Amino acid sequence: MSTRITNDMVIGSTLADINSAQAAMDRSQSELSSGKSLLEPSDNPVGASQQIALQSTLDGLTTYEKAANDGAAWLQTASASLSNVGEVTQRVRELVLQAANGVNSQSDLNDIAQEIEQLTETVKQDANVQYAGQYVFSGTATNTPPYEQGASDAYAGNAGTILRTVGPGVSVQVNAALSSVLGEGQAANDGKLLDTLRTITENLHTGTPAALHAVGGEDLAKLDTNLGSLTSLEADVGAATDQLKTAESRIQSLQSTTATQLSNVQDANFAQVSIEFSNQQAAYDAALRAGASIVQEKSLLEFLQ
């Protein structure tokens, strides 16, 4: 039995070829405009699954990187403040040595005491430093200034720990316990920096031989101990900063590797797709010309309709 090829069959076949060429060309054009070879999960189910997993990994690394950057900035703020406290304390030490030389009048001792009082307030100001609107040395009570200006040296923060997570199961403490160096003043009689500074000031105002002996002896020894504690705290902050920088470097390396893997899975090969698009465009134009020549009795407009 012979099959008769009708004009409608020719038109249908030609139109199908044109639509197929148009669809292929549209697909390549979408890949070129988006830069992606995976436009829908159905394009490559395995590749789509890999894309989701790699993108999730990359998002997690970005979160870790932000935490490392934020933690490093927090610690840099703390380090600068601790450095200032160290400079102030060194200045107090110079004044103590000057006061203990035995040649100062009471007026001179009072002037030295007044400067140390001012330096004590400077120490408390440095302790109240903020990063991004949060008090760095208040523990987890970041909305509360750790020390008030004036006579009271009570610590208003807490001993809470602030961490930044920089990897799976890896966290770094970013807050430093400055209160362990400064203490809570003479009321606490804890021998820490604020207590030492207040005691020095009191002894200078007293000005007796015994008081001046204490300034150059016991008070100076306590001041040196306080400086040692401060140096140790600075070292801890420096170690935490180094840990965060190492973590940041590792994260950036993993980001680069993961981004490359993701690109290999989802990104289009521009050179290859451009060639394919040109070929598809040529095939589409050829299909249109073929359709126009085959269907002589219909106008091209009628044929496309």
Image (cartoon, rainbow, N blue to C red):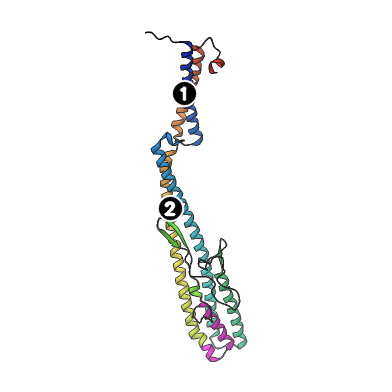
Q: Quadrant of residue 240?
A: bottom left
Residue 45: give its label.
Answer: none
Q: Which residue is mark 2?
A: 251
Q: Which class describes the residues within 10 Å of circle 2: few (<14), some (14-19), or many (20+)?
A: many
Q: Is residue 191 left or right of residue 152?
A: left
- Indicate the position of residue 87 as horizontal and vertical percent values: 53, 72
Looking at the image, which residue sits at the far right?
107
Q: Nearer the viewer, residue 16 or 63?
A: 16
Looking at the image, which residue sits at the far left?
1
Instruction: Give, as a single range, the part of the protein colored magenta.
Output: 189-213
Residue 264 visible in the snapshot: no
Element at label 2: helix
Instruction: State which quarter of the image contains the C terminus.
Output: top right
Name above or below for residue 1 compared with residue 143.
above
Looking at the image, which residue sits at the far bottom?
209
Q: Earlier in the sequence, mark 1 or mark 2?
A: 1
Name above or below for residue 305 compared with residue 197.
above
Q: Quadrant of residue 41?
A: top left
Q: Nearer the viewer, residue 155 or 70?
A: 155
Q: Which residue is mark 1?
A: 20
Name above or below for residue 116 compared with residue 256.
below
- Indicate the position of residue 4 as horizontal and vertical percent values: 42, 9
- Indicate the position of residue 169 as horizontal and vertical percent values: 40, 58
Asked if residue 191 is among those painted magenta in the image, a careful observer would answer: yes
Residue 218 visible in the snapshot: yes
Instruction: State which quarter of the image contains the N terminus.
Output: top left
Q: Which class describes the residues within 10 Å of circle 1: few (<14), some (14-19), or many (20+)?
A: some
Asked if residue 197 is among those painted magenta in the image, a careful observer would answer: yes
Q: Main secondary structure of the magenta part?
A: helix
Q: Amino acid at mark 2?
A: Ile
Looking at the image, which residue sits at the far front?
1
Residue at (51, 60) in percent of width and height: 73
